Amino acid sequence: MESKGPGSWELGVFMEHRARFAVGCLHKQYPEPDRLPEDACLVFVRDGGVCVRSGSTPTIFQETLPDLPEGLKKDARYLGHRGLVPCYAVEVPGDLPLPEGLAYSGVRELAGLIPDEELAVAALAAQIIDYDRTTRFCGRCGAATEPVKTERARVCPSCHRIVYPRLSPAIIVLVRMNDTILMVRGIRAPPGRYSLVAGFVEPGESVEDAVRREVREETGITIKNIRYRASEPWPFPDSLMLGFVADYDGGEVAPDGVEVESTVWVDRDHLPTLPPRLSLTRALIDDWATEPRSADEIKGRGEGR
Ligand SMILES: [Zn+2]
C-alpha cells in the first residue's frame, strides 16, 4: 500500500491513487506541426496492440522506419511531447514488414514488461488510433472528416460538426456497513472472484445518482454519505472510472441475478481474492482495509493494533 497523505480520510480529501493508465509523461503543445517532424518518436499501432522493440530495455517508442510509406506518415496522430520530442501514433497495416527486433503485443499484456509510463502511452496510442478510425466520416452528414491541429478533435468540413474522442464515465463504489464492506460476484466472474459495485453513468444522470442507482439495481440496498475518492482512465476502449465510498443506509441485500449473482459483507480479515494492485477497485479496498480500526471493532475483538 502506498503511503497516504495526512488526513486522507477527511471528507473531501482525495485518495492517493497511482492510476496505471493516466498519461503523465506527455504534455500537449498546440498547434501541432503541419507534418510529421523528422525527430518524432512513433508508437506503431495495429489491431488495438502496439509494436515493441525487444531487448534489454523493451520500449514502445520507435524512430521512424526508413521505408515508412508517406500515407502512414500523413495519418500519424499527435499524442503529445515527451520532453522536447513530439510523439505520434501511427496505424500500421498488417502486411507491412517489421524490422528485426520489433513485434506486436496487446497493450495489457505489456504490464510489467515496459515502464508504467510507456504502458499508459501505449493505451493512449491505441485509443487515439481507434478514435481516428471510427470517426473518419461525419455521423451527421457522411462527409469525410479532417483532423484539427489546435486540439484533439476532428471536424466535418461540410456541416462543421466537431467530434472529440469519446469518454464513457463509469462509477465504482465501496459500500461500508460497520466494519464490513459489500462485495459482489458478477454473473460471468471467475470462481471465487468478488468485486465492488460498478457500472456506467447514463445520459441525464449525475455521477452521484449513478452511484445510488447501481447499488440499488445490483444489490437492492440504499446508501448515504457518498464520497468521491479517486479516478482512473480505463482505455479499453474508453472508460473513465470514478471511485467512491458510501455508507449502507437501508434495505435487504438482494442480488439482481442479472449482473450480480451473489453478494457478501466481508470484514478486513476475511477478504476474498482481490483484483491486482494498481487497480482502482484494489486501491479503494486497500485504503479502507488500512484505515485505523474503529473503537467498536477493537473492543469486539479484544485486541488493538
Ligand atoms: Zn458533417
Image (cartoon, helix red, strand yellow):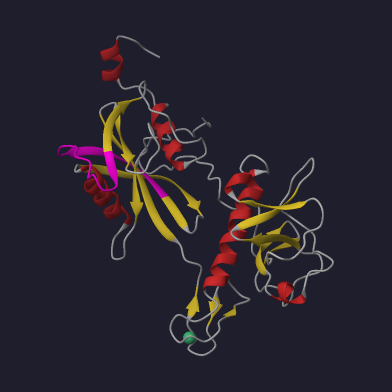
| Percent coordinates x, y for residue 39 in the rendering | 81, 64
Which residue is painted at 49% across and 79% down in the image? Answer: 162
Residue 197 position by quadrant: top left
**In the rendered picture of this protein, how many numbered marks are placed on residues?**
0
Q: Position of residue 279 (x, y in %)?
A: 48, 41
Whether 192 is drawn above or below 69: the answer is above
Instruction: Work out which quarter of the rendered image holds the C terminus and state it.
Output: top left
For this rendering, which residue is in front, 164 or 103? 103
Q: Residue at x 49, y 81 (%)?
A: 138
Report the front residue among 195 and 157.
195
Q: Is residue 50 left or right of residue 267?
A: right
Residue 252 in magenta?
Answer: yes
From this viewpoint, is residue 155 visible?
yes
Name the residue nearer the viewer: 194 or 93.
93
In this view, which residue lies farthest toward the bottom?
Answer: 158
Report the span colored magenta. Answer: 242-261
Which residue is situated farthest in the left direction here?
251
Q: Which residue is most to the right? A: 66
Q: Is residue 141 found inside the magenta-colored segment of the image?
A: no
- Residue 262's x, y, as percent? 27, 37
Say if residue 33 shows up in the picture.
Answer: no
Q: Position of residue 201 (x, y in %)?
A: 34, 57
Tell me if residue 24 comes above or below residue 288 in the rendering: below
Q: Is residue 305 above or below residue 199?
A: above
Please indicate whether residue 171 sits to the left or right of residue 133 in the image. Answer: left
Q: State the residue at coordinates (15%, 39%).
A: 251
Q: Is residue 260 left or right of residue 253?
A: right
